[in-house]
Structures are given as structure tokens and as C-alpha cells.
Image: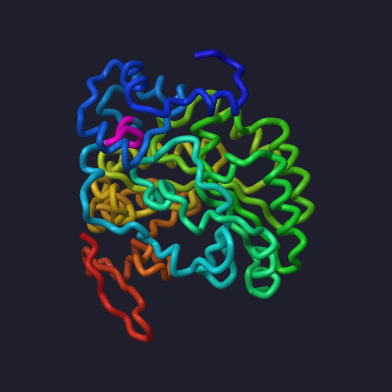
Amino acid sequence: MEKNLSWNNEFAESFKTLLPLYEFLGWPLSKEQESVAKTYPVFVPKRIAHKMKDQGMNGPLAREFLPHALELREDGLTDPIGDETFFKAPQLIHRYESRALFTPTSICPVHCRYCFRKNELNSPHEIFQSDFEKTLDYLRKNSQVTEIIFTGGDPLTLSNERLDKFLSGFASVPSIKDVRFHTRYPVILPSRIDESFLSLLERNQERFRTISLVIHANHESEFDQDTNIAIKKLAKTGIQLLSQSVLLQGVNNSSEALLSLMNTFIENKIRPYYLHHPDKVKGGLHFSLSLKEGRELYLKLRDKLPGWALPHYVIDLPDGAGKISAFNPETTEFSGRFLTKAGDSLSYEEIK
């Protein structure tokens, strides 16, 4: 693999179809996988393909990024967390009172097979259609929103110039005080953390109360020397570094894997933030595990990690009402169940 490529070149040279990817891996390609890729395409950067090859076809990275026949199951939800319900303005999802999601792109540096937006990303969905002036107008009229969360797709797919334009726009709204980015780039294509992007972060810290960058990784093998260097550069800017992970069957559903992942975050000065119970997304149900199993794994994490290093174990409600704790010591007797709000009353909903 050629060294010192720009992130744009690395992105462009990624594997975008199955046959060359499997020829590189030297693994058999099934008709079922070819069929899956017609609905849910593949996108794997070469640096990730090299790691995948080293791990083998049953490794965690192959599970995360290669198609599986079970993705063609018809059950599951196309919008598992209610994006459409809370879509309020162009590229803006306003679910919580004080913060709103901004979706400026549908493009990612890798296609995760468990992604909760995998059905939205594979179609020209309205949540990605832009009209930034209307977006800003909505925010000016809804001054209770104090934080903008860049999501997508992956917002770091955008050029630094585009990001700067968006940040300038949000800074012009008096109520917006905090900005957060959710991204996979530091571990998937660490070359994206270039000097121009670092300067962008440093320059914009004067415009906002906080800038946070939430790094999404699910297994410690996603980290390497290049990712660690990129993350150290991010830490030097003074922004807040947080983590986000999804609990995935066959990838990290063991106490050893989760503990190694959290310790890797901590060693890289990233504070563990979210551990998501998998969403019931159509095409991703083979990654599911029971809430009971998830709680048992989280309980072991609680025994091993100090409180400040323990992520919030959360589950997104399918009606779009937002995240609730998936682990509550006071309600663990409701094994396999959690509370949801239905109107003014509380009801139980089974999580298989």
C-alpha cells in the first residue's frame, strides 16, 4: 500500500465493488453476497482491507464491513430511530429540545453493515437534501437549540472549506453554543486529519463554547499507529474527544473485547461516551443480541472500569423519542424489558 497518499486519494482508491475486493482478500465470494451488494453496496478503503485480510474471513472487521446473506431479511425497520418523524428543516433532525442533528452528507469512508441509516443512505432520502438558509432560519426561530451535531453519512467527508462554511453559518445563530462531530475517519482514514482540518478546529474554538469530536470504533483492531498519531493531533487542538461504539454480535459481544476497546479509547485520550445497543434496522438484525446479554456485559465493564471511563449504555427508542439507559440498576429485574413513554403513560416493550 502506497504511503503518504492524501485522504482524497485513499478514499478514491477504496474498493467499491465485491469482485476486486475478494480477489485482493483471496476469499471465496458467494452468490448471496453478490445479491446483497446490489441492495447494500460495499465501500472498503484499502488500509482496512489489509487489516481484514490479516484477521481472516471470520475476524471482527470482516463482520463489520463485508456483506452477509442475512442482510436480505425482510424484517426490521427502515427508520429504526424515527429520523423521519423529527425531520424539521433541510438536513436537520430536531429530536431533543436543546440539540439538533445536522446531516450534510450521505457519504461515509466505509460502509458498516449494521448502520442504523443503511436504508436511508442507499436512496436519495429527503433528510440529506440541502437548503442551508432554511436550516439557519429554523434554528433562529427555535432558540432552545444550543448544540448542533454533525452526522450523516460522515461529516468529515466534506471538504474543510465546506465545513468552515457550515460552522460560520451556525456561529451566526446566537443560541448555538456547542458543536459536535460524529465520525469514523480517525480510525478508518486517519489521513483525513490533515493540517487544514486541525487549523479549522483551532480557529473555530473561538466561535463556540465547546467543539467535540465523537470517534466511532467498535473493536480495538481498528486502531493502529496511524490512527493513534491522528488522534494525538486532534487532542492537541484542545477539543473534547469522546467515543461511540455499537454492541455487535460477532464483533465485540464479549467482556474482553469491550474492555480492550474502552482501554484503547482511554489510552488515546478519548473519553468513553456511548455504547449503543444495536438498533433493529432492516438489513442489520444479524448483529442483534438480547438486552439481557448486553446488560450482563455492561455489568462486567462496571466492575473493571472507573466511573469516568464507563460509557453510557443506551438504546434508541424505535418511535424516535430518543435514547434511554439500557442499564438501570433499579430496574434490572425487568430482564429483557425497558420503559418507553407512550403519550402520558409508561408501557413495557420487549427487546428480543
Q: Position of residue 311 (x, y in %)?
A: 44, 52
Residue 4 in the magenta stretch? The answer is no
Q: Position of residue 328 (x, y in %)?
A: 34, 66
Taking depth in this image into account, of 348 and 133 the one nearest to the observer is 133
Residue at horizontal 72 percent and vertical 34 percent from the top:
196
Residue at horizontal 41 percent and vertical 65 percent from the top:
82
Q: Position of residue 162 (x, y in %)?
A: 69, 44
Image side of residue 318 versus residue 94, left or right: left
Residue 66 in the magenta stretch? The answer is yes
Q: In the rendered image, which quarter is residue 193 located in?
A: top right
Q: Give the vertical position of 110 relative to 171 (above or below).
A: above
Quarter holding the C terminus is bottom left
Residue at horizontal 70 percent and vertical 37 percent from the top:
198
Taking depth in this image into account, of 162 and 212 the one nearest to the observer is 162
Coloring basis for residues = rainbow
Main SS of the magenta part reads: helix
Image side of residue 155 versus residue 160, left or right: left
Q: Which residues are magenta?
A: 62-67
Q: What number of labels is visible?
A: 0
